[in-house]
Amino acid sequence: MNSTAIIGGTGVTKLEGLRIDRTVNSETPFGPPSAELVQGDYCGREVLFLARHGDPHRIPPHRVNYRANLWALRAAGATRVVAIAAVGGIRRDMAPGALVLPDQIIDYTCGRSQTFFEDDLDEVVHIDFTEPYDASLRQQLLDAGRAAGIGVIDGGTYGATQGPRLETAAEIARMERDGCALVGMTGMPEAALARELELSYVCLALVANWAAGKSVRPITMQDIEFQLARATANARQLLQRLLCA
Ligand code: HPA
């Protein structure tokens, strides 16, 4: 079975349009995933859905069991993963409401379980992570955006922070100097773990707010929710075009 898996981020706990065949309560060598896996049919294709923060949303980014999530998806037949993630915009064109397909990552997280390759190894493994996202799946999503008339920003470096607090203005200024266009809390180790499992993985980033210090307005949950709802509606259309084309 070669399924497409959708990992839903903040604001996306369900995949509309999915005709659900079954839900699976998985166990993995790393414990249970964030929620039950939803398996179903979307435009005649086998699709899996997993709510990264649980359903209802209750697991903060630093507590997500990324290893269990990816392990469970692969065990259920996923070969490619579209990971939806809320982010803050750092670069000027990354305005709230935008959809972005980042092409690079800088990892600022700490203390997360970030590899499958640590115990009982026959040999030490170092995966190639030069290009952290799958080029072909990124292109398919860009093409889907073009076909559906939905603006998707092509590229940008995703800076992954530990959270759950938002950043200081100085932290964002440093990330900007490092070359980050976006900031989010869930992009790592998820992307690296997907590569370790040889899954084709992309991040579909939904810009929820200007990052700290990038706007005179304070960052409120209310604004974040409003912008996420806007971006999520476009993300759903994009996924429909990807899966139904
Ligand atoms: N920082 C980190 N993660 C986020 C943000 C942010 O400003 N907005 C949404 N996720």
Image (tube, rainbow, N blue to C red):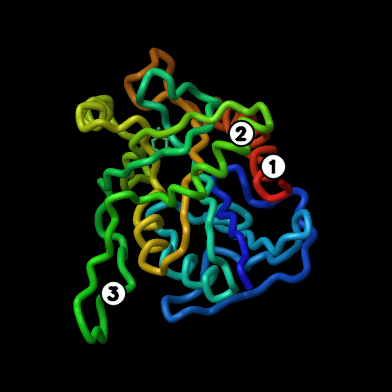
> At which x and y percent is residue 96?
51, 24
Q: Are marks 3 and 2 in contact (CB under 8 Å)?
A: no
Instruction: Determine whether the beta carbon of the residue marked 2 sits less than 8 angstroms from the nearest atom of ligand 1.
Output: no
Q: Which residue is at a point 27% across and 60% down the rendered structure image?
A: 128
Nearest the eye: 51 or 190: 190
**Alpha carbon separation for disc pair 3 and 2:** 36 Å
Q: Which residue is at a point 70% across and 70% down the rendered structure image?
A: 23
Q: Which amino acid type is marked by label 2?
A: Gly
Q: Which amino acid type is marked by label 3?
A: Phe
Which residue position holds label 2? 145
Instruction: Determine whether the beta carbon of the residue marked 1 sits less than 8 angstroms from the nearest atom of ligand 1.
Output: no
Q: Is 89 placed left or right of 141 in the picture? A: left
Q: Which image quadrant is residue 215 in?
A: top left
Which residue position holds label 3? 117
Q: Residues within 10 Å of mark 1 (few under 14, many from 20)?
A: some
Q: Which image quadrant is residue 222 in?
A: top right
Q: Earlier in the sequence, mark 3 or mark 2?
A: 3
SS class, disc 1? helix
Which residue position holds label 1? 241
Q: Which residue is at a point 53% across and 57% down the rendered structure image?
A: 81
Q: Earlier in the sequence, mark 3 or mark 1?
A: 3
> At which x and y percent is residue 218?
42, 20
Q: Is 91 placed left or right of 230 in the picture? A: left
